[in-house]
Amino acid sequence: MGEFSSVVTDIREESRVGGRQRWQMTLERTEFVAGDVGVLEAVARSGARLVVPVLGVVVEAGEVWHLVEKPLGAGTTVTGRVGE
C-alpha cells in the first residue's frame, strides 16, 4: 500500500475508559476503509515527527472516522499509510 496526504477535518471523543481516551478523526481525503489499521504521520511545529497509530476505521453516514488514542488538531496535515 502507498502513502497519501490529507488534512484533519474533525475530531471527537469516542470513549473514555479507566482514564484512557480514544478519539475519532475525519480527514479531507483518505484511503482507509472500514476495518483497516495503519498510521497517520504529522510534523509538529517543533519539527518533531508524530506517528499516530490508526486502531480501526468506522464509516457513519458516509464519513470515514479513524480511531486513534492521540488526536491531531483540525487543520493538521498528515501522511497516511494503510496496513502498517
Image (cartoon, rainbow, N blue to C red):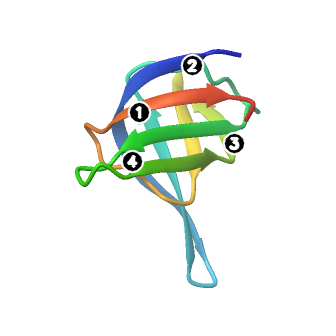
Mark 3 = which residue? 56
At mark 4, the secondary structure is strand
Rendering quarter of residue 16: bottom right
Side of 11 relative to 76 (left or right): right
Dot 4 amino acid type: Ile
Q: Position of residue 27 (x, y in %)?
A: 42, 29
User: Between disc 1 and disc 2, whose residue precedes?
Assistant: 2
How crowded pointer 4 is (Cα within 10 Å; few <14, some 14-19, many 20+) is rated as: some
Whether residue 61 is visible: no
User: Between disc 2 and disc 4, whose residue precedes?
Assistant: 2
Label 2 vs label 4, nearer the camera: 2
Mark 4 = which residue? 11
Dot 2 amino acid type: Glu
Whether residue 51 is visible: yes
Q: Residue at x 43, y 21 (%)?
A: 5
Mark 3 and mark 2 residues within 8 Å of each other at the beta carbon: no
How crowded pointer 2 is (Cα within 10 Å; few <14, some 14-19, many 20+) is rated as: few
Side of 29 relative to 34 (left or right): left
Q: Gap in Å between the C-alphas at discs 2 and 4? A: 21 Å
Mark 2 = which residue? 3
Q: Position of residue 23 (x, y in %)?
A: 51, 56
Relative to 26, residue 23 above or below: below
Q: Which residue is drawn at 49% across and 59% down?
A: 70
Q: In which quarter of the image is the N terminus?
A: top right
Q: Gap in Å between the C-alphas at discs 4 and 3? A: 15 Å
At mark 3, the secondary structure is strand
Q: Gap in Å between the C-alphas at discs 3 and 2? A: 17 Å
Label 4 vs label 1, nearer the camera: 1
